[in-house]
Amino acid sequence: MVAKIPVTPGSEAERIIQRTPLRDGMISVGKPGRLFYASRHIVRLTQERLDEDLLWSNNRSYIYWVVNTSLADVQSIAQDQSPHKLSGDQLLCHACDLVNGFHPDIHTLIRLSDPATAVWLDFNSGEAIEWETDSQITFLGDSIHGMTPYLGAGALLAIIDGWQLSKILADSANGKLSLKEAVGQYEIEMKKRAFPIMQMALQRMLRLTDPNTVKT
């Protein structure tokens, strides 16, 4: 579950930034099965566009937060109703229940959130697959190794894919390899590099959202 809080001069949201680690950029707190993360995005007053939709705008000052939770919480959130069909107010109400026992400032952040920005998101992971190399088509980034965000590695791997593919295509253009050989070598290295990390990110998500996990 994610949402945004508008930040304006003198607001309660601004005061929370000043008295918490948000002043340095972000906070992250959790307990078995649940994790709350928040970060701030602050623009200069002269650059702020209050007429833009807070949900999509990068020209507004806001706090962005995420509550990661377990499958059991997903199943209990709305019983027979899909979480995707809940209103923003309903999602924020459930978010308050999920962070029961967390610091009061976290409850305040959720209370200050704009319901129009509250969204339920499902995190999914790709699977390691095999395919026959084609000299005209290949894959990189999320198109082949989409992963949960729990290692913060998805975008970096996509950049590495692009870099490695461009280098080996240059070798093909220089006559060192055929196009199919170049694509094949890229795919071998890409799978060796990305598929294990994709699995690690999935396992980390499962551990962090498992209510039976005990920190030691």
Image (tube, rainbow, N blue to C red):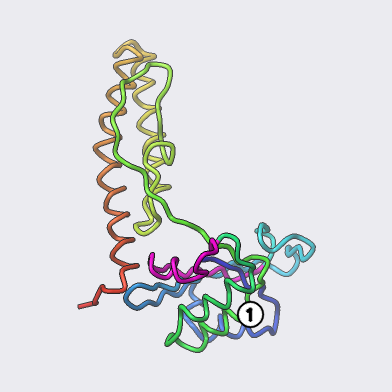
In the rendered view, would you say 180 is above or below 130?
above
Residue at image coords 64%, 65%: 117
Residue at image coords 44%, 66%: 75
Q: Could you tell whether 57 is left or right of 80 in the image?
A: right
Residue 92 drawn in magenta? no
Q: Could you tell whether 63 is left or right of 171 in the image?
A: right
Residue 104, percent from left and from top: 50, 89
Query: Which amino acid type is marked by label 1?
Result: Leu
Q: Which residue is mark 1?
A: 112
- Picture quadrant of residue 4: bottom right
Query: Which residue of the protein is positioned furthest toward the right in this rendering?
Result: 51
Number of numbered labels in the structure image? 1
Comparing 89 with 148, the one in front is: 89
- Picture quadrant of residue 172: top left
In the rendered view, would you say 165 is above or below 46?
above
Q: For the residue carrying disc 1, how many other residues have a C-alpha within 10 Å: few (<14), some (14-19), or many (20+)?
A: some
Residue 23, percent from left and from top: 52, 78
Residue 77 drawn in magenta? yes
**What range is drawn magenta here?**
61-83
Q: Could you tell whether 211 is left or right of 10 in the image?
A: left
- Mark 1 lies on a secondary structure that is helix
